[in-house]
């Protein structure tokens, strides 16, 4: 079962809510949350902004094509990401923006802090930038609740997110193409690479979560509710207490917009399990996984 949780109750340490979050984090790997600082109206506005961009002529989107860069900023065309090497490249489009560090910052040369690419429309930048900032705040609060829910101190992750590798993505899943076969997906089966994912959707079905015993659970949430799930980095960081769960989007008869915030710590944070004696920098983990996924980064150091 995937629980639906009140974010305000989690913030004040409500016992049953934290227990349900802990069970989700260590079990099914997914939950939904409501009553956050991001209203349904804000989510609808962001979805509409992305939808308008994705329906632009391709020539206009190519102006901000991330394939011209060595990072993941801007528009990704259909087929530019492949999350499962056994499947074909994903047929979705997407648009990525990330955290900006000030000039001269010691991490400024890392691709995770590359300059954002923006369309000419200033309204796009205004809406998406404001949404990004508030989504980061929501994710920060949820991560504190997760720490408490799994028996760690509420400040367990404090200091690890000073320059977060937080990536906001708008996903555009068109109606499943007529040519799509058994190896074609909006996004193929995968686990998220990072720490915590905060996902808004337009309410359309499509997301499926793999059950621990096999089979799939459909998950959807209306604007104003958020789907959260836990990534490989958080599973590793917590010594396996938190579980990263495979999921996919097959695609259906209608187009679908989703907005995940991939919330990850600063590049140079050691995310190896406590007292393990190991070192795994958050940025090194993401670098390896991105180079396996983004077609335009494959073969680059």
Image (spheres, helix red, strand yellow):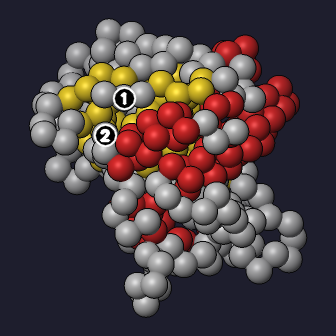
Few, some or many residues within 10 Å of mark 2 (<14, 14–19, 20+): many
Q: In the rendering, which numbered label is found on residue 2?
A: 1
Asked whether the beta carbons under mark 1 and mark 2 sit within 8 Å of each other, the answer is: yes
N-term-proximal mark, 1 vs 2: 1
Across and down, in percent, residue 110 comes to 64, 72
Choose between 241 and 233: the one closer to the eye: 241
Q: Which residue is located at x 31 percent, y 45 percent?
A: 27
Q: Which residue is located at x 74 percent, y 44 percent?
A: 137
Q: Quadrant of residue 63?
A: top right
Decide if residue 209 is in sight here: yes
Across and down, in percent, residue 98 comes to 68, 52
Q: Is residue 215 above or below residue 152?
A: above
Task: Name the residue carrying label 2.
Answer: 28
Across and down, in percent, residue 211 comes to 21, 36
Across and down, in percent, residue 264 comes to 58, 58
Q: Which residue is located at x 21 percent, y 22 percent?
A: 179
Q: Is residue 43 above or below residue 246?
A: above
Tell which residue pokes out farthest to the bottom in this image: 277
Q: Is residue 278 above or below residue 88?
A: below
Choose between 201 and 95: the one closer to the eye: 201
Looking at the rendered structure, the secondary structure element under dot 2 is loop
Few, some or many residues within 10 Å of mark 1 (<14, 14–19, 20+): some
Identify the image quadrant of the N terminus.
top left
């Amino acid at each position: 079962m995937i629980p639906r949780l009140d974010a305000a109750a989690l913030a004040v340490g409500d016992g049953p809510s934290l227990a349900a979050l802990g069970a989700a984090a260590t079990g099914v790997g997914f939950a939904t949350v409501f009553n956050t600082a991001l209203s349904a109206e804000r989510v609808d506005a962001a979805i509409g902004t992305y939808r308008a961009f994705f329906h632009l002529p391709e020539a206009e989107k190519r102006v901000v094509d991330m394939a011209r860069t060595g990072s993941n900023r801007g528009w990704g065309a259909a087929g530019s990401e492949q999350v499962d090497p056994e499947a074909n490249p994903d047929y979705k489009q997407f648009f990525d923006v990330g955290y900006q560090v000030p000039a001269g910052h010691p991490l400024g040369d890392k691709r995770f802090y590359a300059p954002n690419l923006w369309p000419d429309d200033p309204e796009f930048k205004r809406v998406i930038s404001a949404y990004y900032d508030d989504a980061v705040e929501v994710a920060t609060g949820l991560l504190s609740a997760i720490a408490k829910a799994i028996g760690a101190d509420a400040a367990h992750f404090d200091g690890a997110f000073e320059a977060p590798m937080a990536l906001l993505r708008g996903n555009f899943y068109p109606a499943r193409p007529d040519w799509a076969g058994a190896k074609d997906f909006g996004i193929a089966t995968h686990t998220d690479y990072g720490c915590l994912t905060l996902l808004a959707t337009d309410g359309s079905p499509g997301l499926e979560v793999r059950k621990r015993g096999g089979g799939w659970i459909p998950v959807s949430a209306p604007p104003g509710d958020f789907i959260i799930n836990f990534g490989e980095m958080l599973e590793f960081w917590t010594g396996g207490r938190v579980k990263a769960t495979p999921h996919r989007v097959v695609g259906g008869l209608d187009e679908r917009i989703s907005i995940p915030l991939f919330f990850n710590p600063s590049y140079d944070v050691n995310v190896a399990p406590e007292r393990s004696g190991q070192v795994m920098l958050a940025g090194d983990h993401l670098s390896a996984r991105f180079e396996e996924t983004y077609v335009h980064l494959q073969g680059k150091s």
